[in-house]
Image: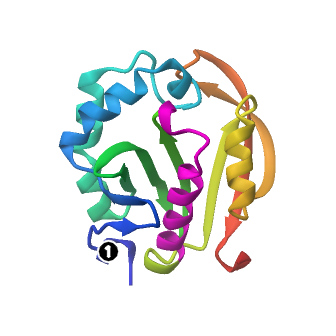
Amino acid sequence: MSAVDIAPRSLPTERLVLRPTRNADAGRAFDIQSDWEVTRMLRTTSFPPSRQQMIQWFADHLRHWRTGEAYRFAVELEGRMIGMAYLDAIAEREANLGYWLDRAHWRQGYASEAARALIHFAFNDAHLLRLRAGHAYDNPASGRVLAKLGFKPHDIVQRDSQSRCETIMQHRYVLEANAG
């Protein structure tokens, strides 16, 4: 089975539902990313966010799913989108795993829960062999999430942060499909 053969579907967890994004999610994502504390941790996102760019980004999600370039899920709690979890830059059976949540939902285990479901999807449905993830040097909470999920430290590199308009140190991690 190739990545292109995967039909969009939801991933239920104990408290959340990860569902394929839809164009209508752009407004809620814009609201969440309008919070500096959320967006400063997102390396490739502008601050303040552009509503038009957000709409255009969401408009490409289904195409990316169909081509196997990316799988992006809205993270829902009790029917309300509280963030996103996604596999991006899929190539050669590897992908970047990412997630972000509305600040009101931090420190409640939702990031771990959503990422755990996404890891299962990546290795069992998309048949990926390796996941990469990273976090800004000043976001140790994200590092704890990744460590809890079995990611191993890979390296620390300088990366441009679009949201901060500066170079940051990024801690990068990897998770192999056969690690668990």
Which quarter of the picture shows residue 26? top left
- Name above or below for residue 148 compared with residue 129: above
The secondary structure making up most of the magenta span is helix
Residue segment shown in magenta: 103-123
- Name above or below for residue 180 compared with residue 60: below
Is 120 displayed left or right of 8 in the figure?
Answer: right
Q: Which residue is mark 1?
A: 6
Q: What residue occupies the far left of the structure in this picture?
A: 24
Residue 113 magenta-drawn? yes
Is 157 displayed left or right of 27 in the figure?
Answer: right
Local secondary structure at mark 1: loop
Is 107 displayed left or right of 85 in the figure?
Answer: right
Q: Position of residue 169 (x, y in %)?
A: 75, 30
- Give whichever of 103, 5 is nearer the camera: 103
Residue 124 magenta-drawn? no
- Give whichever of 62, 149 is nearer the camera: 149
- Name above or below for residue 177 compared with residue 140: below
**Which residue corresponds to the image point at 39% horizontal and 68% vertical from the top-left?**
12
The amino acid pointed to by label 1 is: Ile
Which quadrant would the N terminus be assigned to in this image? bottom left
Q: Position of residue 71 (x, y in %)?
A: 38, 59
**Which residue corresponds to the image point at 51% horizontal and 18% vertical from the top-left?**
36
Q: Position of residue 25 (x, y in %)?
A: 25, 41
**Which residue corresponds to the image point at 50% horizontal and 41% vertical from the top-left?**
100
Q: Position of residue 61 (x, y in %)?
A: 28, 50
Q: What residue occupies the far bottom of the structure in this picture?
A: 1
- Tally the marks: 1
**Which residue corresponds to the image point at 71% horizontal and 25% vertical from the top-left?**
168
Circle 1 Cα neighbour tier, 10 Å, few/some/many (<14 / 14–19 / ≥20): some
